[in-house]
């Protein structure tokens, strides 16, 4: 452990270092006066803390020194962040109570009177170094606890994200959708703005699985999910897997016309993937049917908007699939040219 001893008399430094080395303290550094001590600690005279502090475990300061006495030096050291926990022992021939109080107020932890008694010196040095070791151990434990707490916090965030994601498609799951829709419902009701929901069903998906197998079905769902996700970019929008082969899109601040444009774009994008579907009677490729519902929320639950979109989706499927239909107007939308 490193000990810095500071005195303005070289003989005193030499004697003190010899005592410490005889007790096995090999790493002892001398500083002849306050300026040399500050330089050793890399503390600027104006009090600027060091960019790279040195490792020191104990500082022993003589009180009586020219230019800057030990009490002022102690105060500067103790107000420098890297050295706040380094114990300081004051050394002086003056032991008046008022003088001692001033030294302790400056941050000193102990006091040794001159002439120095070797046994007393070594006992107090050992106690100070033991205190420093205990402080270092405590800080190390605190850092480790902080590191573990951060790891736990990050793990919890990952778990929270995972609990909100559909594992197959990577989209938001039904739980996340419900929370997001409720939040957007309240915001739209407060701001008196339109809110739209699009429910999407992959046409005749069971027949697709029967014809091509479940691995191919999973692949098709992932490709559809990617298209839906790529087509919606606004912070107020969400694409989620609603369940099975169904998806949902929440469009905040979007009226019926805008929702239809988005829905028709999604329908066309999925069809353009050209994923073969020989078991479909809607088209020779994988297609989707879409139900759109739009409302400026007032009272009532957000689930009512989903129910309206579900009704429109049922209409689209009943009328031939690969269609966009609206809850407010069942005639809205156009059939795909390929249908």
Image (cartoon, rainbow, N blue to C red):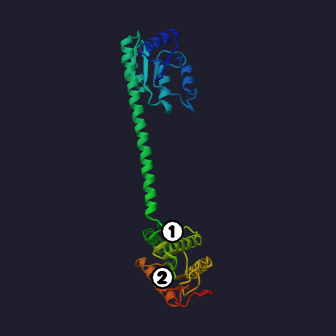
Residue sitting at x 52%, y 13%: 8
The secondary element bearing badge 1 is classed as loop
Question: Spatial distance from mark 2 to mark 1, Cα to Cα?
Answer: 22 Å
Q: Which is more toward the observer, 307 or 36?
A: 307
Q: Which mark is residue 215?
A: none
Residue with the mark numbered 1:
169
Q: Which is more toward the observer, 225 or 70?
A: 225
Q: Is residue 119 above or below residue 137?
A: above
Q: Which mark is residue 309?
A: 2
Quadrant of the rendering where the C terminus is positioned: bottom right
Residue 10 percent across, percent down from the top left: 53, 10
Residue 95 in view here: no
Q: Is residue 264 above or below residue 126?
A: below
Q: Which is more toward the observer, 218 or 45?
A: 218
Residue 45 percent across, percent down from the top left: 58, 26
Residue 238 percent across, percent down from the top left: 52, 70
Q: Is residue 116 above or below residue 330?
A: above
Closer to the N terminus: mark 2 or mark 1?
Answer: 1
The secondary element bearing badge 2 is classed as helix
Residue 254 in view here: yes
């Amino acid at each position: 452990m490193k000990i810095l001893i500071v005195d303005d008399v070289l003989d005193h430094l030499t004697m003190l270092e010899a005592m410490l080395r005889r007790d096995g303290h090999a790493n002892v550094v001398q500083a002849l006066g306050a300026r040399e001590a500050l330089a050793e600690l890399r503390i600027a005279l104006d009090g600027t803390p060091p960019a790279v502090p040195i490792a020191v475990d104990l500082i022993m300061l003589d009180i009586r020194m020219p230019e800057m006495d030990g009490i002022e030096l102690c105060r500067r050291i103790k107000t420098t962040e890297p050295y706040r926990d380094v114990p300081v022992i004051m050394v002086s021939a003056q032991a008046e109570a008022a003088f001692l109080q001033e030294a302790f107020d400056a941050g000193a932890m102990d006091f040794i009177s001159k002439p120095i008694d070797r046994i007393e010196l070594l006992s107090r040095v050992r106690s100070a170094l033991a205190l420093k070791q205990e402080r270092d151990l405590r800080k190390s434990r605190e850092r480790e606890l902080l590191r573990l707490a951060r790891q736990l916090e990050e793990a919890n965030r990952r778990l929270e994200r995972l609990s909100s994601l559909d594992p197959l498609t990577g989209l938001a799951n039904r739980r996340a959708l419900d929370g997001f829709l409720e939040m957007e419902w309240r915001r739209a009701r407060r701001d008196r703005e339109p809110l739209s929901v699009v429910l999407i069903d992959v046409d005749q998906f069971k027949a697709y699985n029967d014809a091509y197998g479940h691995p191919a079905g999973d692949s098709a769902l992932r490709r559809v999910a990617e298209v839906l996700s790529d087509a919606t970019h606004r912070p107020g929008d969400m694409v989620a897997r609603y369940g099975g082969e169904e998806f949902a899109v929440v469009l905040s601040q979007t009226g019926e016309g805008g929702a239809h444009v988005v829905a028709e774009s999604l329908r066309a994008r999925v069809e353009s993937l050209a994923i073969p579907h020989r078991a479909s009677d809607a088209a020779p490729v994988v297609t989707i049917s879409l139900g759109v519902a739009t409302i400026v929320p007032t009272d009532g639950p957000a689930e009512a908007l989903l129910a309206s979109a579900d009704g429109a989706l049922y209409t689209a499927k009943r009328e031939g699939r690969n269609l966009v239909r609206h809850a407010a107007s069942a005639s809205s939308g156009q059939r795909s040219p390929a249908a």
